[in-house]
Image (tube, grey):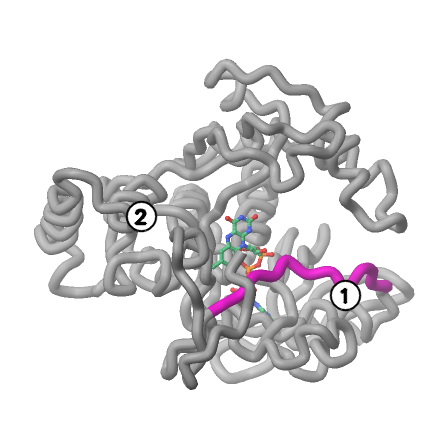
């Protein structure tokens, strides 16, 4: 029996960077697309992130005068990857990343610059000590009037002024090191925020988007131009599969479960599982107690659970991108602790005033 409540070409589960960019590619290829998001805010962990992307051999790097090649980048990633990651996956990444970035910049109001930020293991073969593989998003100015930005997830409290005024990396540097006239940057940011009348009386959202907000915000504006709907508070519950083929998914929308047929495919982009205690214990015991992870509250591993339920395989579930976080009582996630660790001469103490880690 196949009774469908709705039909589309492509169903995208999750509204972070992965889901929104996939949706935009599909919509540009004339597919009818629906995006579903579990939470009442969209943007996922991507919205709260720095949105720095590591891509070798980009046009943006060339524009900065940096010559790169994907073979060296392949060597670099190969040596740092688990043995079971196939060569072709790494090649696909290092050879197509630059095309992806070019495409995104041409089809959405998202602009990046290549940054002189050295590779983490620049000393390894193929590593880049000069950088220019890390790309950072430029701020998205407040010229648009699109109301969907009001429900975009705020940036991380640790990566914004007072938790709601967006800053870019240069402004963060100014507040951290307070060079001469640093207060002018502060005054400009406050004026920019408070004098934004169309938004100021109706939302606490800063319309000038930076970092992860600039990435997902720009993608959403491009999707809205193409009238691609994004349903909030509409979790995917399970995949619908017949004879080994995924045909659609059950979505809880406006309080009832509906069956959505996806004629061409379902894209699972529902983030990680750091907010799922059971999955952390089973897959990443080192992070058993990482209940204050910096990931979004929606990160409960739903797409992995749904995939496994119809027989999909998983790999490298124990691999994580991890860093120390602070937990501030009352906040959903931990604050990524990066800048504080970089301050010279600082030590970290616990509630008893005892030093408990090597800050480096
Ligand atoms: C503070 C911080 C800074 C970071 N900075 C960087 C950086 O500079 N560079 C970098 O490469 N990485 C960075 N990361 C990591 C990066 O942000 C994430 O790996 C990335 O954003 C994941 O993107 P995604 O699209 O896969 O998932 P997400 O952006 O998390 O989106 C997934 C979405 O799916 C939704 N969802 C979950 N379950 C369901 C369901 N059942 N139905 C519908 N929707 C569902 C979630 O609510 C969420 O909105 C950072 C992470 C943090 C926490």
Report the image quarter containing ligand 1. Answer: bottom right
In the rendered image, residue 183, in percent from the top left (x then y), is placed at: 13, 46
C-alpha distance separating marks 2 and 1: 32 Å
Image coordinates for residue 101, horizontal then vertical, percent: 55, 32
Mark 1 C-beta to ligand 1 under 8 Å: no
**Camera-nearest label, 2 or 1:** 2
The structure residue drawn at horizontal position 45% and vertical position 38%, both measured from the top left corner, is 136
Q: Is residue 176 left or right of residue 343?
A: left
Find residue 303 and report its horizontal and vertical position in percent.
Answer: 69, 68
Q: Which mark is residue 49?
A: none
Indicate whether 254 appears above or below 13. Answer: below
Residue plotted at (42% across, 39% down):
137
- Disc 1 packing (10 Å; few <14; some 14–19; many ≥20): few
Q: Quadrant of residue 226?
A: top left
Q: Which mark is residue 172?
A: 2
The magenta segment: 313-325
Residue carrying label 1: 318
Question: Which secondary structure lies at badge 1?
Answer: loop
Please say whether residue 309 is one of the residues in the magenta stretch: no
**Total count of labels:** 2
């Amino acid at each position: 029996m196949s009774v469908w409540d709705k039909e589309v070409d492509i169903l995208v589960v999750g509204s972070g960077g992965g889901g929104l960019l996939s949706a935009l590619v599909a919509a540009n290829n004339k597919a009818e697309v629906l995006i579903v998001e579990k939470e009442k805010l969209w943007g996922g962990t991507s919205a709260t992130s720095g949105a720095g992307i590591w891509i070798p051999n980009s046009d943006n790097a060339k524009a900065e005068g940096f010559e790169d090649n994907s073979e060296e980048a392949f060597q670099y990633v190969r040596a740092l990857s688990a043995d079971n990651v196939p060569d072709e996956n790494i090649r696909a990444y290092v050879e197509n990343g630059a095309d992806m970035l070019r495409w995104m910049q041409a089809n959405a109001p998202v602009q990046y610059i290549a940054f002189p930020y050295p590779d983490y293991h620049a000393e390894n073969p193929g590593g880049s000590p000069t950088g220019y593989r890390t790309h950072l998003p430029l701020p998205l100015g407040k010229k648009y009037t699109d109301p969907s930005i009001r429900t975009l997830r705020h940036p991380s409290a640790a990566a914004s002024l007072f938790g709601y005024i967006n800053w870019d990396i240069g402004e963060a540097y100014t507040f951290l090191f307070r060079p001469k006239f640093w207060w002018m940057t502060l005054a400009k940011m406050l004026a920019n925020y408070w004098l934004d009348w169309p938004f100021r009386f109706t939302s606490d959202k800063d319309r000038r988007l930076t970092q992860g907000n600039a990435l997902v915000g720009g993608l959403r504006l491009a999707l809205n131009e193409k009238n691609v709907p994004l349903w909030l508070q509409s979790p995917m519950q399970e995949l619908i599969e017949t004879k080994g083929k995924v045909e659609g998914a059950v979505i809880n929308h406006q309080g009832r479960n509906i069956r959505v047929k996806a004629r061409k495919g379902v894209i699972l982009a529902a983030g990680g599982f750091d907010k799922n205690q059971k999955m952390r214990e089973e897959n990443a015991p080192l992070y058993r107690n990482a209940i204050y992870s910096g990931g979004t509250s929606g990160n409960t591993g739903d797409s992995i659970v749904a995939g496994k339920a119809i027989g999909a395989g998983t790999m490298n579930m124990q691999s994580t991108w991890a860093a120390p976080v602070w937990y501030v009582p009352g906040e959903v996630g931990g604050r990524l602790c990066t800048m504080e660790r970089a301050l010279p001469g600082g030590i970290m103490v616990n509630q008893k005033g005892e030093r408990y880690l090597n800050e480096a």
